[in-house]
């Protein structure tokens, strides 16, 4: 009977809180399970990226994504020391500090700071998945740059690119199709309009689109056969501030560049 009630409780959290997912962060302050004080908003206002990893006790699928994200974050931290903070939080308020601390240490998750409760936070970000992962960033805006209830390996790349964009790191399009010699996106960050310039080495069909950080296509700027230099404009005024991708496809190959919108 307890198992049935537990399953129903999870379903209620998923259904009820999903419609209330937010695009801005919820403040988190005070001591973690190690007794270290934190202020999430202060971290964001210092220009840091903050990762929230919500897990379920005894969930075998929850540690591997945290480990993949930690490996990605450590690579970035080599160039941006101290600029990524990560919290490990159970989706309920009934998990002990001892359990979360052991969960982090036994899974080699030294990047993550353990907390014993996360029910209010996970509801704010749209409900519980196995695991729920949230990436926050933005001085003053405290925005949700990425979130998912169903983590996949490709999400690590999306999170990496979003963090690098936040830090104004390398964001040029690499590994271009052979028919494209260069792609320029300017200005970047963009306020109300962005220009995309594509230089082709031969006549080919080129598709240029704008996607969000989850890979959802927001607009197709062009999809036609061209030659020489292609110049296109895109109005960004309707997009909320945040990180997006300019995706260029040709010869069956897709490349992308982070676009930061900041009105």
Image (cartoon, helix red, strand yellow):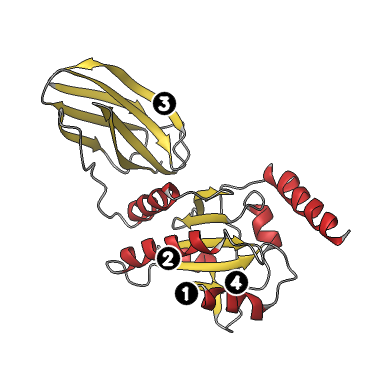
Tag 4 residue = 29
Most extreme residue toward the bottom is 35
Q: Foreground residue, 140 or 215?
A: 215
* Residue 105, x across and y down, in percent: 52, 78
| Location of mark 2 (residue) | 70
Task: State if disc 2 and disc 1 touch (CB < 8 Å).
Answer: yes
Within-10-Å neighbours for mark 4: few <14, some 14–19, many 20+: few
Which of pointers 2 and 4 indicates the residue nearer the eye? 2
State yes or no: discs 3 and 4 in contact (Cβ < 8 Å).
no
**Circle nearer the viewer, 3 or 1:** 1
| Distance of label 1 from label 4 (alpha carbons) | 24 Å
At which x and y percent is residue 183? 20, 34
Q: Is residue 1 left or right of residue 10?
A: right
Q: Which residue in the structure is indicated by mark 1?
A: 108
Q: Earlier in the sequence, mark 2 or mark 3?
A: 2
Instruction: State if disc 3 and disc 2 touch (CB < 8 Å).
Output: no
Q: Nearer the viewer, residue 253 or 166?
A: 253
Q: Report, in whole angstroms, how far the alpha carbon at label 2 lies from the one at label 3.
A: 32 Å
């Amino acid at each position: 009977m307890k198992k049935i009630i537990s399953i129903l409780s999870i379903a209620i959290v998923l259904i009820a809180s999903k419609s209330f997912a937010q695009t801005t962060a919820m403040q988190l302050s005070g001591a973690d399970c190690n007794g270290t004080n934190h202020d999430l908003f202060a971290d964001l206002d210092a220009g840091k990226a903050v990762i929230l990893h919500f897990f379920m006790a005894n969930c075998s699928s929850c540690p591997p994504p945290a480990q993949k994200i930690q490996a990605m974050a450590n690579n970035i931290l080599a160039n941006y020391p101290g600029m990524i903070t990560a919290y490990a939080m159970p989706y309920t308020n009934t998990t002990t500090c001892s359990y979360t601390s052991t969960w982090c240490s036994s899974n080699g998750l030294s990047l993550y700071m353990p907390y014993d409760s996360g029910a209010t936070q996970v509801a704010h970000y749209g409900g519980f998945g196995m695991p729920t992962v949230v990436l926050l960033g933005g001085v003053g805006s405290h925005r949700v740059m990425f979130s998912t209830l169903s983590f996949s390996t490709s999400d690590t790349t999306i999170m990496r690119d979003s963090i690098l964009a936040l830090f104004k790191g390398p964001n040029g399009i690499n590994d271009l199709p052979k028919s494209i010699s260069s792609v320029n996106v300017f200005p970047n960050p963009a306020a109300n309009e962005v220009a995309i310039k594509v230089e082709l080495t031969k006549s080919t069909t080129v598709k240029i689109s704008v996607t969000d950080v989850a890979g959802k296509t927001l607009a197709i700027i062009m999809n036609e056969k061209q030659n020489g230099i292609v110049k296109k404009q895109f109005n960004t005024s309707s997009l909320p501030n945040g990180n997006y991708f300019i995706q260029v496809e040709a010869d069956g190959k897709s490349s992308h560049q982070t676009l930061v919108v900041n009105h």
